[in-house]
């Protein structure tokens, strides 16, 4: 068999400390962490933990990061796969890849499976023009059957991310499957400030830098944008041979990133 693996297994070193804001989402996921840390204790108490949880929110808001952090906090292996990839790259084997992934995760239980862009496989069946896509449907059917096929002692939690919960096949949302949703919100300015602080840990800021105006001046930006701005500021400061990143570098980086965002919008029109 070819060694090409579409999923990767890792031990996550990300923790909640790396995820800024998202207080509500973190709180809701806390229960999952407690379960994964000590599944038997949970079951003894008769608690029923959800198997599948949908992380719903716009791109770049930290869904993947959050999933990794859950694995990091619980100290369990993290199996990740991007749904769009496994359809595009491996025609005819999507379903067997899904089977493979779940089998491996079960062997490593307690564990977390994370499926990014669930909507790529999870769009409602038969909705496509021209009779739908068999490959995708087979993959989706396999996923549904895996979600139903867990034994109680197989302590695997499946997290999936989407920014289009409205297009998902309703079969995915039935009890026992992805029956719980955690909303991952766009950050407000306070959260943006926290996100900037997380990413500021990795760079050298000048003493007089105040991140508050930047946080207030970046409405609409998400974590991925803010990380990019911080990185761009470091590059600009480096190019100018500065000792540290100053307010002026952050300003320039923000403008540059905004320009990039505008261009992207323009091109996608
Ligand atoms: P997509 O839907 O595009 O996959 P996503 O919601 O999964 O996006 P991530 O991939 O988790 O977003 O975010 C990209 C990067 O942005 C993260 O690796 C992290 O560095 C940064 N980031 C996003 N949100 C946060 C946050 N709340 N706190 C700290 N960093 C964040």
Image: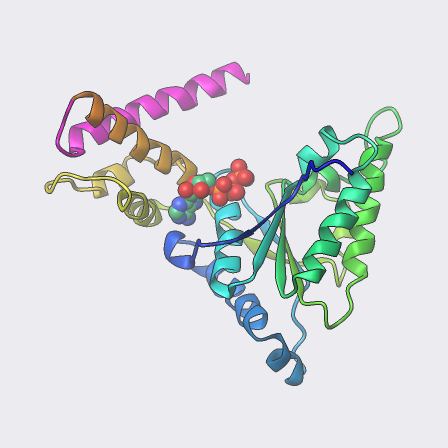
Report the side of 138 relative to 179 (left or right).
Answer: right
Q: Position of residue 130 (x, y in %)?
A: 87, 24
Closest to the observer, 202 or 171: 202
Q: Nearer the viewer, residue 156 or 171?
A: 156
Q: Is residue 202 above or below residue 258?
A: below
Find residue 241 and report its horizontal and vertical position in percent: 15, 24
Q: Quadrant of the C terminus?
A: top right
Q: Is residue 58 above or below residue 180?
A: above
Nearest the viewer among 173 and 155 is 155
- Looking at the image, which residue is at 17% across and 42% down? 210
Q: Which residues are magenta?
A: 241-269
Q: Position of residue 194 (x, y in %)?
A: 31, 50
Which residue is located at x 48 percent, y 56 percent? 69
| Residue at x 40% of width, y 21% of height | 260
Q: Is residue 54 visible?
A: yes
Find residue 263 and report its image quarter. top left
How many numbered discs, if any?
Answer: 0
Q: Is residue 229 left or right of residue 149?
A: left
- The quarter in which the N terminus is drawn is top right
Residue 77 figure quarter: bottom right
Q: Is residue 193 left or right of residue 169?
A: left
Magenta: main secondary structure = helix
Q: Which residue ends up furthest to the left in the rendered image?
A: 208
Q: Is residue 68 magenta?
A: no
Residue shown at the point (68%, 74%) measured from the top left: 48
Q: Is residue 252 magenta?
A: yes
Percent across and percent down for residue 37 are: 54, 71
Q: Residue furthest bottom?
A: 45
Q: Depth check: 90 or 134 in front?
A: 90
Q: Is residue 170 visible?
A: no
Residue 121 location, quadrant: top right
């Amino acid at each position: 068999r070819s060694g090409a693996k579409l999923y990767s297994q890792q031990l996550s070193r990300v923790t909640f400390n790396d995820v800024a804001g998202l207080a509500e989402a973190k709180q809701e996921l806390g229960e999952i962490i407690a379960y994964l840390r000590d599944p038997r204790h949970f079951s003894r108490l008769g608690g029923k933990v959800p198997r599948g949880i949908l992380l719903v929110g716009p791109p770049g808001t930290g869904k993947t990061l959050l999933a990794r952090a859950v694995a990091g906090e619980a100290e369990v292996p993290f199996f990740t796969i991007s749904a769009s990839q496994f359809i595009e790259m491996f025609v005819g084997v999507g379903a067997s890849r899904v089977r493979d992934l779940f089998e491996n995760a079960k062997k490593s239980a307690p564990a977390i499976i994370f499926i990014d862009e669930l909507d790529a496989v999870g769009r409602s069946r038969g909705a496509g023009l021209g009779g739908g896509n068999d490959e995708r449907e087979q993959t989706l059917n396999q996923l549904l059957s895996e979600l139903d096929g867990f034994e109680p002692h197989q302590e695997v939690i499946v997290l999936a991310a989407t920014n289009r919960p409205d297009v998902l096949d309703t079969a995915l949302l039935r009890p026992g499957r992805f029956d719980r949703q955690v909303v991952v919100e766009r950050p407000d300015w306070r959260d943006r400030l926290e996100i900037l602080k997380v990413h500021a840990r990795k760079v050298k800021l000048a003493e007089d830098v105040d991140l508050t105006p930047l946080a207030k001046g970046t409405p609409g930006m998400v974590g991925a944008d803010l990380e990019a701005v911080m990185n761009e500021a470091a590059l600009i400061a480096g190019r100018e041979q500065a000792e540290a990143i100053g307010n002026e570098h952050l300003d320039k980086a923000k403008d540059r990133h905004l320009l990039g965002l505008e261009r992207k919008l323009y091109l996608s029109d």
